[in-house]
Each structure stands twice: as structure tokens, then as C-alpha cells.
Amino acid sequence: MNDPARARWRLIVAGRVQGVGFRPFVARQARRLGLTGAVANTPEGVVIEIEGPQAALSSFRRSLEEDGPPAARVDLITATTIPPLGDADFYVRTNHAAGGGAPALAPDRAPCPACRAEIRDPAARRFRYPFTACADCGPRWSIATDLPWDRAHTTLAAFPLCPACRTEFEDPEDRRFHAEAMACPACGPQLTLRTPDGGARSTGDDALRAAVDTLREGGILALKGTGGFQLLVDATRPEAVARLRRRKQRPEKPLAIMLPGRAETDTLARIDDVERALLESPEAPIVLVEGRPEAPLAEEVAPGLGRRGLMRPSTPLHLLLLDDFGEPVVCTSGNRSGEPLCVEGDEAVARLGDIADAILDHDRPVARALDDSVFQVAAGEPQCLRLGRGCMPTRVPLPAGEPAVAPAPVTLALGGQLKAAPALTLANEVVAGAHVGDLESDAALRRLDGEARALGSLCGVDIERIACDRHPDYASTRLAETWNLPLTRVQHHHAHAVAALAEHGVREPALALVWDGAGLGDDGTLWGGECLSLDRDGSWRRSGHLRPFRLPGGEAAMREPRRALLGLLHARYHGDRAALEASPARALFTAAEWQPLLACLDRGINAPVTSSAGRLFDAVAALSGLRIAAGYEGQAALRVQEAAEAAGPADNAAQYGDTDAITLDTDLAPWQGDWAPLVDALLAERAARPVDAPARMATRLHRALAGFAVAAARANNRETVALTGGCFQNRHLLQQCVDALRAAGFRPLWPQRIPPGDGGLATGQAVIARRATSPVRTTDGD
């Protein structure tokens, strides 16, 4: 034991190292190098005690950093020298529950190649078994109930391993060595196909085959996936998709499509290498891509849109179903529009029984609801639009230079009213929680509360501070007030800005262009076309914004782009009645609507002031004839985006001169970006009535906003420019702004791992609140 050539190290490995086959990998590496000791999962991370010659120990540590399992990510290794013990072998220990620390759990992963082959092999023990998993794939976050990662701390605790599975579990050379999510037909969960009223029709593989028959007959299938129920229907049958829309009460919003194989991907869409890599990744997200007009899909899948949301099977159950069915299926969340996701069978019968024709249930509980993640490729990079299955937990290291807070307060943030999702700060990172959705019901608010509490539990920490939006009427704000903890209220656009910068590890100073639909500003108006200057000490100011205008009818204007157009023209013409009567807005309203709305604008009653870039998009949608009313959030702006993209490279490269610029009025403080020259150019374009007027108008808007981005950056003289807020989900706008800023010598950054819309708000709120060292401070202030 006192041999100076030998040593014993205690290593704590932090990162994504639980639920990814890391302990089996450690054991194999130790035995290969002739080392002894033990490894265990703990809430701190993976703890290894390793003993042997110094040279072998150094090789072992390098292998941890360079050669880990595919799903693993090592963020930090902390090493301590301890006295040698002279172990006889290397052991995988029972996991330890003591202590606290960051979540090291892995996200759920789609079936690996070996498991895909196994469930398709008639000679294999797991042939057609829909819950097949191994150390490299299967459910993780969705079934975890506690730390550390161990079968007893998952929803598989009620399914003890059979002798055959136990042998695989204990064999260091087997890919299921300590694979906690593994199971087989003899010992694991089973399928049951139910009627809409909950009666059992069939079980096991018979249930799967009967579910496929439901799809072949044009029926709607409710299927229990990794994070809850989904609704499936044949994507090639217009009448079946239309029936799903009627029953789900989702008349126009696009529906995602799950594909049987790679060949169908190329048949349905034009995709590049980055998009293909996203589709085929273990995360298996929905990926927004350019659809082929000739594709054999029902028009009802995405009415009036060229883009499609495609995904590959994310579980063995989906894979077997698609193998048997052989056609693309609509795969959308298992709920009625406006309600949260259904999670368990009884709930599905109660809430989906009048939507689905059959319910494919199983007896493995879901620990927490997870919608599918959504990605696109924007400015050449993957961009997350919704965090969910396959991406949870998402961990963002805090920027270098964050103020030292001893001890750092564990801060929970609850996001906003729409696309709500929580986030949690730990000592050196932010953990972003899963998408919950719009908080339009008590059930949705309860789900946000549950997701937030689970985030703290699975991080092994006690929450010490709460953060929320400053808007007093947001449901998330009211929820935050019930926690009875020190509360930090964060301005909406400041949170967007800090989230974008934190993701890239940037500590201010920087300029943030935060463009979205609306958020409560410090002056009581609705901000949304903001230019925020952020400094290294955490302070910020509103240095500029788009010229404001009123929205007649308040919230109704969010649903009717024609109202945004009327408010914009009312501001452009300074309320001149004759000009408004002669404007294109007049034809969009009845006589009974027209006069009351003008009175609202003239008097400023039920006509809030906004600087929103999102409402500017709405106004252009109405002016160009693309959309005068919206069936879902962002629909009008999406039509404007697609019109600009359809204009083609030549039109998008055209220079329109000074008339389409958004000019800066620097005599005002904050300065304003005046859109009047742009509006005049758009009106002239419309009056000329060329066939391609909508596309040309959409192109003008995007180019004008890109020019405004450069002008704002020059006015602030800051090299780093963050582009964030819901408007930057528009990949065409993002590309135009990135290109223009780079050409002008600036360094643009934009959200990629964290959503740019309100799904990313909580990340910024949490970082800002963590900086508020006073336990009684209740605003982020200036």
C-alpha cells in the first residue's frame, strides 16, 4: 500500500454523466488499464475512486475526457489524492443519495442502431418489444423520480429485472451493463389498446397491430409516448387530418409529421446536411424544413405554408408503429387546443375520449410531461424553438465574470404568460426546464408549478429565490407570489437580452435588439422593438426603440392584423380622417366597426401604445393582403416571412434606396426608429399593384429591419449585438440581420440552445435574479 509508484485518486465527474452508460465505460477503462477501485452515481455527479500506477491513472483520466459514451458530456473533473486501499478489483457500486448538486441526468434518447436492429430481428429476445433500451438509448429524464440515476429512482421501479435481464445488467461487456431503463417482454411494461371510453381491446403486440389498423382505417390514435400522449393520424388522408383538426379544435396551426424512414424525408422535403443531422440525431426533435409542393401530404397538415415540421420515431414504440404502417403520420400533442398535455391513461380517456378513435396505453408511468422539442436551421446553425423531450435537461454555464455570491442563491424563474417554461440557477450554471405552454388554464398553471418543483428536486437543491416577469397579471407572476420566497420581478425584454448573452457566455457590455410581440415596459406601454444597452455591472437602459403606435381594441389587435395596420396608419397620418378614409385600411372594416375604432385611437381608450416589431409584421401582413386575421399566434408574421423567402435571392438582394429605411430620430431620448419612410414605400408598392406586390413588400420590411439593426448598433457603438425575442424565430429576418451586422463590422449573437421567444425568458430571469444579492430586492431596476 505504501508503494510510491502507486496512488489512489478520488474523482468527481460533473456533466451529463448519469443515464448515459458512463459507469460501465469507467469500469471497462479501469480494467483495461489494470486499475482497481469503484464508481457510483451521486447527486454531485459520478464519483470514482481509482488506484494503480501513476502513469495508468493519468491515462485513465484522459480517457474520461476524450473517450466517453456518445451521449456523455464531461464538464469538470475534480481530483483529490487519498490513501491507497489495495482493492482486489474494480466495482460498480450502488448509487448514493446523500448530498446535493447539479443534475447530471441525460435527456431521453431515440433508439440506437443496435436496439433498432434488435426489435426488428425475429430471432432476438426483444423482437417487436416497444420498451427496448440500453445504456446508449431510451428514456431518462422523463422517467426519473429522484437522484441519483438508479432504477429505484425511476418509474420502472415497479418492474424488477428477470434473470435474463439481470445477467445482461451485471455483465461488464454487455451494452446493457447497468442500463437502468432496460426491460424485456418477460419483466417490462406492456401495451394495452383501449376504446375511447377506456375499455381494454387488446394487449401486447396485438395491441400494436390493432393500433396500426386504426390508422389504416383513417382513425385517430392517441398514443402514450415518452412524455405523455400524442395524437396520430394518416398524414396523406385529407379527411382524416381535417377530422383531427375539428376534434382537437386546432383549425390552422401546422401539425408535425413523423416519418417511417429516410426515403420519405427526401420525398416530402428539401433538406440540407444540418437539417438532416438534426432529424437523425438521438434527440429526435421536430425540425422545420422546406416542404416539396408535390409531396403526397394532405394540404390540411400545414394550410397555406411551405414549411413542414418533420420528425423521426423517438421511441421503439413509434418505430414499430411506423414500420408496420409504412406512411407518414401526423404526430401532435395529446390535448385539446389550449389545454396541457395528457400524461396517463385515465386522464387520456377523460380528455381525449371524444377526440381519439383508439387509445394505445401502457403501464410505465410518466414522471413528467414532455412535449417534443422543436428546431430549425437559421443563419447556418441549429436553433431551438421549443425545449422538450430529447433536450431536457438543458444546462447553460453562467458567463465568466458573474459576480461572486457566497453562497450563490439557488434561483427559480417561472417565465412569462405564453410558452411558459421554468429555469433554475445553480452555482455555475442555469438549468432550463421543459416547455409547459400558454398559461390559459388552471391545469397549465399547475403543470408549471409541478415542473418547477421537479426541477429543484432533480437538482438536489432547495430553492432560495424566485424570479418572474414584471407584468402583474401574468399567471406565472401570481404563481411566483405564492412561493413566499424573496422575489425578483424582471423586465420582459431585459430577460430576453440576458438569456441570449448568457447562452454564449458573454458578460456585458453589449447591445441587445429584442424584437417580439409585446412585453410590459417600464413606462407602462407595450414594448417590443427594443434596443437595450447592457453594461458589465449588470445595469441596462433602453437606448432606443421603434416608433410607437396604438393598437385599437387592445388584445383584439393581437389576433387581428388589420387593427395593427389601422393603428400604424393612424400614427403615420397623425389621426387625419381624410387620409385614413382613403387608406387601404378602410376596406378592411365595416362601417359599424370603423368609427368606434377611430374613436378609440383618437382618445387613447382601449388602444395601448406599443413599439412592437411583431405588430409591425402584422400590419404589413394586412397591408399586403397576406393575412387580416390570425388563427394562431405568429401566423401573420409567418406568412410575411414565407412571402419574403419566396421572392428569391435576386429580389432579396435588390437595393431599394433610402425610401425603405427605418430612420433614427436621435433628437429623442430614447431615440426612435421611424418606420414612416418604410410605410410610405409599402403603400406606393401596393398602389402600383404588381402581381408580386406581397413578396416585394415582405422583402422591403425585412431589409428595412436589417438596416435598422445596423443603424442601432452604430448609434450604440458596441461590437457585440444580441438578436433575440420572438421575431428572431423568423429565420429570414435573422439571416438578413446577421449578414448586415457582420458586413458592418459587428459581432451578432442569437439564441441557439435556448428559445429566442418567451420559452427562453426564465433563463434570463434566473440569471438577473441571481445577481440581486439583497434578499429584499424586488425589481431588477436600472
Image: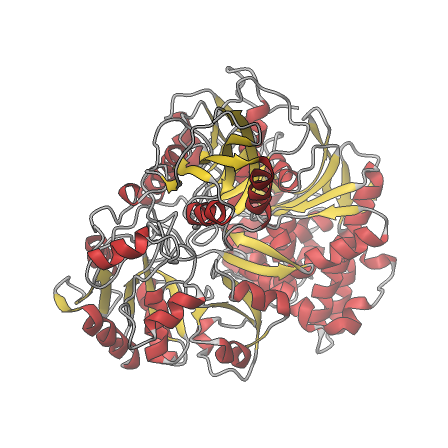
Residue 529 percent coordinates (x, y): 67, 44
Q: Quarter-wise, where is residue 584 in the image? A: bottom right
Give the residue displayed 30% in from the left and 61% down from the top: 131
Give the residue displayed 62% in from the left and 34% down from the top: 494
Furthest residue in direction left, as rendered: 199
Q: Quarter-wise, where is residue 626 in the image? A: bottom right
Residue 72 percent coordinates (x, y): 51, 49
Furthest residue in direction front, as rendered: 3
Left or right position of 75 against 242: right
Residue 85 percent coordinates (x, y): 43, 28
Q: Which of 125 and 9 is in front in this view?
A: 9
Q: Quarter-wise, where is residue 355 in the image? A: bottom left
Judge whether 105 appears above or below 194 on screen.
above
Judge whether 254 appears above or below 58 on screen.
below
**Quarter the C terminus occupies:** top right
Give the residue displayed 54% in from the left and 61% down from the top: 635
